[in-house]
Image (cartoon, helix red, strand yellow):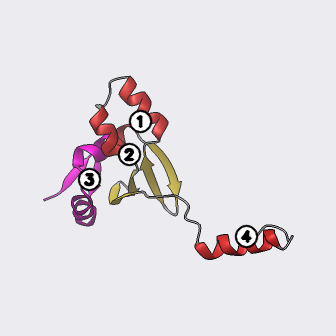
Amino acid sequence: MKYYIKNFLLVPHALTRSQQRGIKLDILDLILQFGEEKYSKGAYVYFISNNKIKSLVKGRLIHPQQSEEIYNITVIVKNGTILTTYRKNCRYKISKKFTQKRYQNKRAGGSHV
């Protein structure tokens, strides 16, 4: 059985991942409808920024409960096919080793890394 969301084919991998990650299909639909589209590494990345979520709630296009569900969800699309979905955590993670090295250089009077 094939699933389509906004004329995008939902492959079995994406369906399985969305179920495992607790991402409902109607939320994917909202992200593809209202989300921002960025091209990265051969595929399109769809997401909804915090400001966009606030404006959608204010404009009564989505419910406040849906805004909580949409927050930090990313949809990857290539050639009209939804490849996968995931919840985005912290965008930049700074390793402990990096911060320790930077602190040591700062104490020694050296330049920042």
Secondary structure, mark 4, is helix
The residue stretch that appears in magenta: 1-30
In depth, the one of 21 and 98 nearer the eye is: 98
Q: Quadrant of residue 17?
A: bottom left
Q: In the displayed image of the protein, which residue is found farthest to the left?
A: 1
Task: Give the Cα separation between the discs numbered 4 and 3.
Answer: 40 Å
Q: Is residue 48 visible?
A: yes
Residues at marks 1 and 3, CA–CA distance in whole angstroms: 17 Å
Residue 6, image x, y percentages: 29, 43
Q: What SS does tag 3 mark?
A: loop
Q: CA distance from mark 2 to mark 4?
A: 34 Å
Q: Is residue 89 magenta?
A: no
The reply to whether discs 1 and 2 touch (Cβ–Cβ < 8 Å) is yes
Residue identified by numbered label 3: 23
Sequence-first tag of 3 and 2: 3
Give the crowd class for mark 3: few <14, some 14-19, many >=20 residues within 10 Å.
some
Asked whether the beta carbons under mark 1 and mark 3 sit within 8 Å of each other, the answer is: no
Looking at the picture, which amino acid does disc 3 mark? Answer: Ile
- In the displayed orientation, state which residue is furthest to the top: 59
Q: Are marks 2 and 4 in contact (CB under 8 Å)?
A: no
Mark 4 or 3, which is nearer the eye? 4
Residue drawn at point x = 34 percent, y = 38 percent: 67
Q: Check the image and report above or below for 33 versus 38.
A: above
For the N terminus, which image quadrant?
A: bottom left
**Residue at far front of view:** 107
Amino acid carrying label 1: it is: Ile
Task: State whether residue 6 appears in this view.
Answer: no
Give the side of residue 59 with respect to residue 29, left or right.
right
Left or right, 37 with respect to 81, comes to: right
